[in-house]
Image: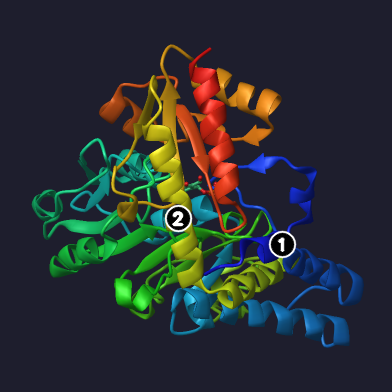
């Protein structure tokens, strides 16, 4: 079992006594990752893949090692399969702009997606006249695979689906959805923003073509994220930007792209962020993703049990903690979610998030909520006592 007290020592920010339950928005960063970033600035602050001098050589080695570390962390065959980007949003936009769309194509996505994996496809529809099919789920975020079977056909070019909902916390059966998609020759993009930080992920086993994720939600620095690109689509995936660092050769009237992943990382990349993300993967690997997942389930259980017992509090998402990660959204009867979050911060020293969580289609279609709800999201550094503190604070607030 994960030693949470030992882990908390790596997060001196927690010594302030503030209870941080907003990791789904952005996680905290442990000292080994901070130190790795500082080491870059203190010891070998230089550009990558451009210089023969020793600092540039060291920076390039660390930068390349980070790609390998991230690839290993998600079960990708090699560093060439991981393009470093600044976040999940950029990774998804890269795919939307990479493919050669025509009017006959179709995208299939779901109603529980974050805007990053939704409006991107609305725009592809607007721009190229592509068909768009939105698969509905139950209020708990549970999908009937039969609905995916009905939605996906031979004209489907891409299925874009989240691994874990950032509102309902539910885990989506992406492997089964990928199988359905592949039977029809469609590509599969998984939004791993909330999955990769919490669940051991193996892209090969999942059978996906693309996996987008955010480093800043998995202990890495802000401005770090990745896009896994499977071998079979590496050649057909066009870079979002090209320029310095992305070419093998250029003449007056032609150019040849560099090998992946460099062809996807135009200009001077976010070197410190990438090196920091590599270190975050090393950190999570040392702790063990199975341990992270098990602790997450305990926190999810406690959160769900505690909140659902409260009178005048509505909790969203699946009732079964096995189907979710340590994230719960709720509303207090008669109260605006922003007021609840503000009271939690000001009077109880607890950070949560309130609003629609960038998932308006879900909020409107499933719950008819315009103001959204309050979200408490945990990570490996949270304790059961912190969850209890949240539950008793919400109880007090609900009693007025
Ligand atoms: C499921 C999901 N997808 C995409 C995103 C977008 O992530 P980012 O802001 O890092 O691009 C988020 C962020 O909260 C998310 O929860």
* Residue closest to the eye, 41 or 23: 23
Element marked by disc 2: helix
Residue name at image x 47 percent, y 77 percent:
81
Question: Image height check: is 42 above or below 16?
Answer: below
Q: Residue 206: percent from the left, percent from the top?
A: 31, 71
- The residue under the point 62% across, 56% down is 381
- 147 horizontally vs 380: left or right: left
Q: Where does the image place residue 153, in percent across and percent down from the top left?
A: 11, 57
- In the picture, residue 254 is in which quadrant? bottom right
The vertical placement of 170 against 53, above or below, is above
Quarter of image, res 363: top left
Q: What secondary structure is marked by label 1?
A: loop
Judge the density around disc 1: few (<14), some (14-19), many (≥20) Cα neighbours within 10 Å: many
User: Does the closest atom of ligand 1 sit within 8 Å of the Cβ of label 2?
Assistant: no
Residue 254 visible in the snapshot: no
Q: Nearer the viewer, residue 372 or 14?
A: 14
Q: Which residue is mark 2?
A: 298
Dot 2 or dot 1: first in sequence order is 1
Residue nearest the viewer, comparing 243 with 39: 39
Most foreground residue, 306 or 10 = 306
Look at 23% across and 43% down and name the residue there: 132
From mark 2 to mark 1, how far is it between C-alphas?
22 Å
Mark 2, Cα crowd under 10 Å, few <14 / some 14-19 / many 20+, is: some
- The residue sitting at 43% across, 64% down in the picture is 199
In this view, the residue farthest toward the right is: 42
Report which residue position mark 1 lands on: 30
Q: Tell me: residue 361, above or below residue 285.
A: above
Residue 265 in the image, given as x and y percentages of width and height: 60, 68
**Rendered location of residue 87, percent (x, y):** 56, 55
From the viewer's perspective, tell me whether residue 310 is left or right of residue 341: left
């Amino acid at each position: 079992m994960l030693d949470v007290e030992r882990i908390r020592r790596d997060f001196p920010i927690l010594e302030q006594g503030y209870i941080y339950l907003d990791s789904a928005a952005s996680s905290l960063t442990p000292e080994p990752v901070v130190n790795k970033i500082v080491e870059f600035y203190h010891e070998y602050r230089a550009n990558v893949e451009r210089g023969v001098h020793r600092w540039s050589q060291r920076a390039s080695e660390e930068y390349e090692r980070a790609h390998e570390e991230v690839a290993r962390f998600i079960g990708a065959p090699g560093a060439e399969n991981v393009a470093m980007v600044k976040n999940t949003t950029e990774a998804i936009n890269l795919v939307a702009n990479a493919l050669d769309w025509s009017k006959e194509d179709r995208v299939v996505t779901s109603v529980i997606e974050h805007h990053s994996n939704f409006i991107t496809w609305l725009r592809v529809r607007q721009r190229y006249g592509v068909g768009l099919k939105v698969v509905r789920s139950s209020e708990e975020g549970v999908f009937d695979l039969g609905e995916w079977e009905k939605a996906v056909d031979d004209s489907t070019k891409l299925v874009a689906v989240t691994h874990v909902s950032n509102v309902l916390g539910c885990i989506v059966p992406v492997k089964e959805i990928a199988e359905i998609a592949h039977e029809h020759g469609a590509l599969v993009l998984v939004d791993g923003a909330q999955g990769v930080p919490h669940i051991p992920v193996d892209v090969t086993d999942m059978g996906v073509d693309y996996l987008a994720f955010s480093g800043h939600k998995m202990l890495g620095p802000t401005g770090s994220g990745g896009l896994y690109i499977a071998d079979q689509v590496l050649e057909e995936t066009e870079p979002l930007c090209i320029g310095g660092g992305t070419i093998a050769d250029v003449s007056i009237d032609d150019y040849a792209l560099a090998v992946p992943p460099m062809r996807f990382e135009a200009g001077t990349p976010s070197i410190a962020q990438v090196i920091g993300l590599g270190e975050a993967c090393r950190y999570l690997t040392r702790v063990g993703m199975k341990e992270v997942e098990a602790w997450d389930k305990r926190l999810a259980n406690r959160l769900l049990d505690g909140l659902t017992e409260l009178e005048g509090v509505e909790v969203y998402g699946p009732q079964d903690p096995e189907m979710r990660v340590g994230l719960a959204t709720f509303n207090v009867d008669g109260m605006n979610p922003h007021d609840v979050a503000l009271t939690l911060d000001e009077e109880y020293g607890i950070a949560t998030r309130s609003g629609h969580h960038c998932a308006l289609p879900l909020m409107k279609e499933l719950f008819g909520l315009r103001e959204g709800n309050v979200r408490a999201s945990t990570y490996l550094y949270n304790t059961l006592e912190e969850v209890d503190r949240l539950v008793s604070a919400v109880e007090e607030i609900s009693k007025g």
